[in-house]
């Protein structure tokens, strides 16, 4: 009886790597009527939830300003992950509508890149 050595010496397949989530670098103004959200753009990510009103009773954001955006392929979605994203850049703003959730996609990593959002309610 012969044993196939190749079958005995095979290694287990590696688990697929989990995509890295971006790091929220700074969150300020938590107890006021605004929130500053700073997001690291060093990695690519898709539909990362950067804001949600779940657990914040009575709070609905009304205005969002893009203070800084170092990336050229950064998209934002409001209130629903399943809609098309909006390409954003510094100086863009979204006012006078209800914001319950914000999702961000970064299609191109930017070394030392940052996205800074000013959210107000």
Image (spheres, helix red, strand yellow):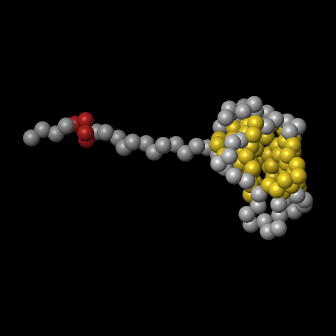
- Residue occupying image coordinates x 12% and y 38%: 2
Furthest-right residue in this view: 33
User: For this rendering, which residue is in front, 111 or 87?
Assistant: 87
Decide if residue 11 is on the left or right side of residue 78.
left
Quadrant of the rendering where the C terminus is positioned: bottom right
Above or below 71: residue 20: below
User: For this rendering, which residue is in front, 70 or 3?
Assistant: 70
Image coordinates of residue 89 in percent, x first then y, are: 82, 35
Quadrant of the rendering where the N terminus is positioned: top left
Decide if residue 17 is on the left or right side of residue 53.
left
Furthest-left residue in this view: 1
The number of callouts visible is: 0
Furthest-bottom residue in this view: 57
Image coordinates of residue 7 in percent, x first then y, are: 25, 39
- Residue occupying image coordinates x 65% and y 48%: 82
- Residue occupying image coordinates x 64% and y 43%: 46
- Residue occupying image coordinates x 76% and y 61%: 53
Q: Is residue 50 visible?
A: no
Image coordinates of residue 4 in percent, x first then y, are: 19, 37
Q: Is residue 60 visible?
A: yes
């Amino acid at each position: 009886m012969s044993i196939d050595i190749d079958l005995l010496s095979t290694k287990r397949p590696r688990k697929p790597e989990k995509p890295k989530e971006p790091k929220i670098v700074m969150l300020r103004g938590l107890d006021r009527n605004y929130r500053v959200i700073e997001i690291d753009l060093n990695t690519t990510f898709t539909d990362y939830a950067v804001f949600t009103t779940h657990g914040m009773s009575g709070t609905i954001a009304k205005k969002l300003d893009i203070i800084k955006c170092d990336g050229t392929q950064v998209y934002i979605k409001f209130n629903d992950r399943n809609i098309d994203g909006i390409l954003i850049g510094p100086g863009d703003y979204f006012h006078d509508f209800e914001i319950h959730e914000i999702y961000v996609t970064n299609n191109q990593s930017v070394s030392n890149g940052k996205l800074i959002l000013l959210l107000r309610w």
